[in-house]
Image (cartoon, helix red, strand yellow):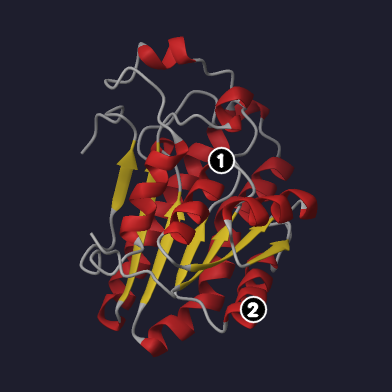
């Protein structure tokens, strides 16, 4: 299938490793011109060279306004943006009683406000050109909360509400908005949470962790021209782990 992405201009956040890098690489392979962002300049430059992205920028999405800055930099380098993939790291593991106000504020900025900031900056041009793709990388925890991931559970669920609310407003302009829900995927995040292959085999019908390139294939399709009628959805890539529809 021709995804129709040749020459499309994409911005991928949190792209130095893991899911973000895999999505950026998949878009490059489809012929898109890709700008990638992460907080570490050396790592993001190394990633740019490794996957063939066009440009790379170092920005900390925990900082207010970083999403807007990313859009402005990418627009200047690429001449515009057709696709935005919003991806950030997960907050620290903690029970509700152990989450400080500072942790809530930090998580809200990183997970939620950075997405809002980025979308606000990128959306007007997408609507004007009558074509755009907005992908929000959340988690299966947005639908099925996980033990001790209190901040992530709460805020990622909020992103699903944002996805549906926004998609209803912009569908008539040729802009699609979808949430992607990765399950247990082989990234450094799994190692940080202490999740092992044996743990996954007992819980996931596929009996294994997912691989980043499998998730990236879903993202590339949702960014494509053939996916123009898919919007306002929360789509899991989880080996069958979610029990809710």
Residue drawn 55% across and 26% down? 190
Secondary element at image label 1: helix
**Label 1–label 2 contact, CB within 8 A:** no
In the displayed structure, would residue 223 be above or below residue 242?
A: below
Q: Tag 2 or tag 1, which sits nearer the N-term?
A: 1
In the displayed structure, would residue 8 be above or below residue 62?
A: below
Query: To which residue does mark 2 refer?
Result: 77
- The front one of 236 and 208 is 208
Residue 144 position in % (x across, y down): 36, 33
Residue 166 position in % (x across, y down): 37, 69
- The front one of 55 and 168 is 55
Q: Give the crowd class for mark 1: few <14, some 14-19, many >=20 residues within 10 Å.
A: some
Which quadrant holds residue 97? Answer: top right
Which quadrant holds residue 239? Answer: top left
| Quadrant the C terminus occupies | top left
In the displayed structure, would residue 20 be above or below residue 145?
A: below
Residue drawn 58% across and 53% down? 51
Q: Is residue 160 left or right of residue 171?
A: right
Query: To which residue does mark 1 refer?
Result: 18
Residue drawn 37% across and 56% down? 220
Q: CA distance from mark 1 to mark 2?
A: 24 Å
């Amino acid at each position: 299938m021709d995804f129709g992405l040749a020459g499309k201009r994409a911005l991928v956040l949190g792209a130095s490793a893991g899911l973000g890098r895999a999505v950026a690489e998949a878009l490059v392979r489809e012929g898109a011109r890709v700008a990638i962002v992460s907080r570490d300049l050396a790592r993001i430059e190394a990633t740019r060279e490794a996957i063939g992205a066009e440009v790379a920028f170092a920005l900390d999405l925990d900082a207010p306004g970083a999403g807007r800055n990313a859009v402005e930099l990418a627009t200047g380098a690429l001449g515009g943006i057709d696709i935005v993939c919003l991806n950030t790291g997960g907050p620290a593991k903690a029970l509700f009683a152990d989450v400080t106000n500072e942790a809530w504020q930090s998580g809200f900025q990183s997970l939620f406000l950075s997405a809002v900031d980025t979308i606000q900056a990128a959306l007007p041009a997408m609507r004007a050109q009558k074509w755009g793709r907005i992908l929000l990388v959340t988690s299966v925890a947005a639908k099925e909360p996980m033990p001790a991931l209190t901040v992530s559970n709460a805020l990622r669920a909020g992103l699903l509400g944002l996805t549906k609310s926004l998609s209803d407003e912009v569908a008539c302009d040729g802009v699609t908005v979808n949430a992607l829900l990765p399950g247990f995927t082989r990234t450094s995040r799994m190692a940080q949470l202490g999740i092992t292959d044996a743990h996954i085999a007992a819980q996931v019908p596929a009996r294994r962790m997912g691989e980043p390139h499998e998730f990236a294939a879903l993202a590339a399709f949702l960014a494509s021209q053939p996916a123009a009628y898919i919007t306002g959805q929360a789509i899991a890539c989880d080996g069958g782990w979610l029990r809710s529809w």
